[in-house]
Amino acid sequence: MNNPADQIIAANKANMEAFEGAFKKAFAGAEKLVELNMAASKAAVSESFSHAKAAMSAKTPQEFMTLQTGFFQPLAEKSTAYFQHVQSIATEGSADITKQIEANMADAQKAFGASVDQLVKSAPAGTETAVAAFQSALNNSQKAVESAQASIKKATAAAQANFAVATKQTTDMVKKAAKAV
């Protein structure tokens, strides 16, 4: 496959397949979140009705308060487990997609570089200056892509850290609220 056009077409096809795979992984993560939310909602509704029935049958205010305390205290653990599950789904999905995109981008850059090398070799005499300028522009664009990838990694890591902090703060608030009841 020495034809540069064939190499570029093959690289584009590989990139399209990579994006398709990334979207499939993203949808799989969304499906996991939907399943988690449906299960959590179903459990919450069931527990709420059970608690409401028990609360309605309480004979004394003390019995009612005991029921309330017994209902709200486990919410902290349930909330913590829920947020940790959401975080693991999000982290797993983004890590898989990032790995796949990085691998395919590296392959595409190699293929494109090979195509450019082939074009440089077959460039007519007297075009050395234009070829050097093209190669310089290409190198600069590849450095920009690498810089963007590094920035995306840093932003993703920061977002995951912020999500972990928010999860901890939320669960701490739920624990405090459960103790206050």
Image (cartoon, helix red, strand yellow):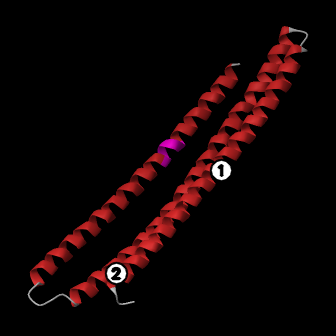
Which quadrant holds the N terminus? bottom left
The type of residue carrying mark 1 is: Glu
User: Taking 84 as reference, is 58 left or right?
Assistant: right
Residue 173 image offset from top left, x and y in percent: 60, 28
The residue sitting at 22% across, 85% down in the picture is 120
The residue sitting at 54% across, 58% down in the picture is 23
Residue at which label 1 appears: 31
Q: Does the magenta portion include 12?
A: no
Residue 136 image offset from top left, x and y in percent: 18, 74
Question: Does the magenta stretch mainly form a helix, a strand or a loop?
Answer: helix
Span highlighted in magenta in the image: 160-164
Mark count: 2
The type of residue carrying mark 2 is: Ala
Residue at which label 2 appears: 5
Helix, strand, or loop for circle 1?
helix
Q: Does the magenta portion include 162?
A: yes
Q: Nearer the viewer, mark 2 or mark 1?
A: 2
